[in-house]
Amino acid sequence: GAVVSQHPSRVICKSGTSVKIECRSLDFQATTMFWYRQFPKQSLMLMATSNEGSKATYEQGVEKDKFLINHASLTLSTLTVTSAHPEDSSFYICSARETGTAKLFFGSGTQLSVL
Amino acid sequence: AQKVTQAQTEISVVEKEDVTLDCVYETRDTTYYLFWYKQPPSGELVFLIRRNSFDEQNEISGRYSWNFQKSTSSFNFTITASQVVDSAVYFCALSEDVSGGSNYKLTFGKGTLLTVNP
């Protein structure tokens, strides 16, 4: 079946540094990818929709300058948390929609801990 | 606006018991998809089912079954003869209108933590 690779699975960084998370569709093309955030014991909240070759669409309340999204190819989207602070610590998970279908596949998530 | 309600925050059962997880949704769209995902302690989301709004047939897959009732906007999930490995958080989700260029964004419920005790 289709696989979405998300890397890294876990990252610990110092406050003020930037962290890049990759979401890669391995055996299908994904024109659209989604980035979600999940706090402990909470639901997944959509942060932004990433479309290949265009600017991402951010949900209300999500700082676009804080969470930079790049979707430069049909198989790769990246989320960069800039100048990370402890309140950015969370579980980030991506999903990719197979181009031309309604099928969604999720990555395995990235646990970000900012010290 | 879309909304998914999973009223059961936590459920605890003993192995071999049947358990039903409730999901009620709200949407103005006439065409939409409903999903169930499982999130084990390791964190990844495991896809269980996707159901088109036009297909109200119930579905059974092994020990899993789903009851889609459009009249009550519910999409309940039943695990028969539960096992310890079923312990996880289960999310119900709804995607917006899938026609005409939509991006298929998912709205998730808050999840139900299922604990199956031996």
Image (tube, rainbow, N blue to C red):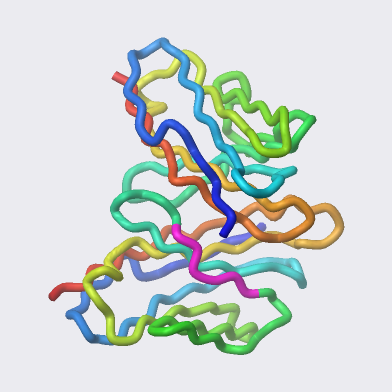
B44 displayed left or right of A115? right
B9 displayed left or right of B108? left
Predominant secondary structure, magenta span? strand
Residue sitting farthest toward the bottom: B57
Residue at horizontal 50 percent and vertical 82 percent from the top: B66
Q: Position of residue B97 (x, y in %)?
A: 75, 62
Vertical order, B13 against A86 (above or below): below
Q: Nearer the viewer, residue A6 or A94?
A: A6
Vertical order, B73 against A48 (above or below): below
Q: Is residue B50 magenta?
A: yes
Q: Is residue B68 magenta?
A: no
Residue sitting farthest toward the right: B100
Residue at horizontal 58 percent and vertical 47 percent from the top: A95
Q: Position of residue A68 (x, y in %)?
A: 60, 23
**What span is in magenta?**
B46-51
| Image quadrant in which the N terminus of chain B is located | bottom right
Residue sitting farthest toward the top: A16
Vertical order, A31 against A82 (above or below): below
Number of numbered tags placed on the structure image: 0
Q: Position of residue A35 (x, y in %)?
A: 57, 40
Q: Nearer the viewer, residue B82 or A90?
A: B82
Q: Position of residue A56 (x, y in %)?
A: 70, 32
Q: Nearer the viewer, residue A101 or B9?
A: A101
Residue at horizontal 63 percent and vertical 38 percent from the top: A48
| Image quadrant in which the C terminus of chain B is located | bottom left
